[in-house]
Image (cartoon, rainbow, N blue to C red):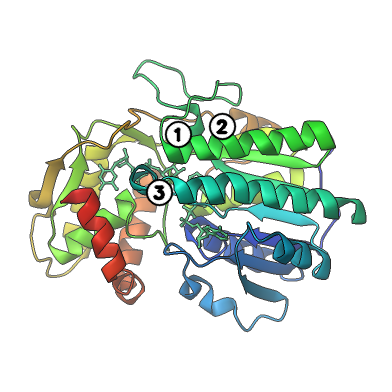
Amino acid sequence: MSPNNQNKSPRHILITGGAGFIGSNFVHHWCNKYPDDQVIVLDALTYAGNLNNLASLQERKNFRFVKGNIGDRPLVDQILAEEKIDTIAHFAAESHVDRSILGPDAFIQTNIIGTFTLLEAFRKHYPTLEKGLFLHVSTDEVYGSLNPEDAAFTETTAYAPNSPYSASKASSDHLVRAYFHTYNLPTIITNCSNNYGPYHFPEKLIPLMCINILLGKPLPVYGDGQNVRDWLYVLDHCSALDTVINLGKSGETYNVGGNNEVKNIDLVNMLCDLMDELAPNLPVQPARELITFVKDRPGHDRRYAINSNKLQSELGWNPTVTVEEGLRETVKWYLNNRQWWEVLLSEEYQAYYQKVYE
Ligand code: NAD
Ligand code: TDX
């Protein structure tokens, strides 16, 4: 097996969506681990993008932030050429399933057309490089929904997306695959399970529950709360992507997951108990009293579970954080970073919240 990018350090890496949740965690990981690399972040700063996530890096000499859209071809061409980019780590996306149900347009534009634009730009730029890599960060949701007795998703599970979000990600995965087979472009796809940790935007289950507990607001659990997600601490996802960039093989797909299947209601109970233990003076205690079952999400996938044996056995990656440890760290982070999340509860966010929950 021949890795893509061996001996390429110092790299010139373009990280799209680097001001979002996983992207910003990855930018910090990369800058700490590879201080000699040139790191460029391209991010449109949508509602989900937040420059505060990158505040501590702004003074770094080999770091540059560009506010812009991945669908802006002249801008992408300019960055690739000017910065001699050899590696793209592509995180930029519309990422929230509930928003994709309310309005799919942005998901088609960014996740499909945006990815296509990046691929076209990289195809034109690639002949100027000796080696390079286009890493496409995708999701386990492309595989659809599992029954309780089904085996976990592997890299050969057929695609069966059920939401506009997952359909748009599936579509972009297919384009990335096609660019490897048709144009010999060195691409890799990773399909990861649900992430959680610092800088997670308040609309997603775990931060939403943490914040609502701190504010004494109802904790809206969809349907019967028996849906299962397979949780991975975001820094374990970052180390997996690092491993894939260094050791992964072009044209391959790698599933990423931590073997942490939890029912939503159990997860929410765990968060309530951690908050009861760690937060002084909660408005409502025990926090479990806030749990409220609400109308189910349309097309709500019942269960996700990911088999990451390929990444573990072929490339030697292993997750390091258990869900108990990771949730404790995450609860502490939301307790200690109130100023980070308070400003995100904007009028726009309240309007979104009303549409989904009220
Ligand atoms: P996020 O919504 O927190 O961040 C997305 C970032 O992309 C934001 O900074 C946003 O400003 C930026 N962006 C959006 N549209 C853009 C555009 N057109 N041009 C440039 N930038 C744009 O998302 P996330 O949770 O960090 O997810 C990152 C990637 O990982 C996504 O591709 C997502 O599909 C994938 N993923 C997420 C999870 C998860 O649990 N969150 C799991 C598996 C895979
Ligand atoms: O208020 C809520 N109540 C609730 O019961 C919210 C926001 C969610 N849920 C449920 C729906 C899911 O079963 O919790 C589970 C997790 O929901 P989300 O945090 O919205 O994540 P999910 O829909 O599973 O998708 C996430 O993981 C895969 C990310 O948002 C995607 O970007 C990623 O691809």
Q: Is residue 7 above or below residue 280?
A: above
Look at 83% across and 65% down and name the residue there.
81
Q: Nearer the viewer, residue 338 or 108?
A: 108
Question: Residue 305 or 345: which is nearer the viewer?
Answer: 345
Sequence-earlier tag: 2 or 3: 3
- The residue wearing badge 3 is 96
Which element type, helix, strand or loop, lies under badge 3?
A: loop
Q: Position of residue 26 (x, y in %)?
A: 58, 59
Residue 91, position in %: x, y? 58, 53
Cβ(mark 3) to ligand 2 < 8 Å?
yes
- Marks 1 and 3 sit apart, C-alpha to C-alpha, by 22 Å
Task: Identify the amino acid type marked 1.
Answer: Asn
Please determine whether, in this image, residue 236 is positioned above or below residue 179.
Answer: below
Q: Earlier in the sequence, mark 1 or mark 3?
A: 3
Q: Quadrant location of ligand 2?
A: top left
Location of residue 11 in the rendering, given as x and y in whole percent from the top left corner: 79, 62
Q: Kindly identify which numbered label has been placed on residue 259.
A: 1
User: Could you say whether the residue bearing mark 2 is in a helix, strand or loop?
Assistant: loop
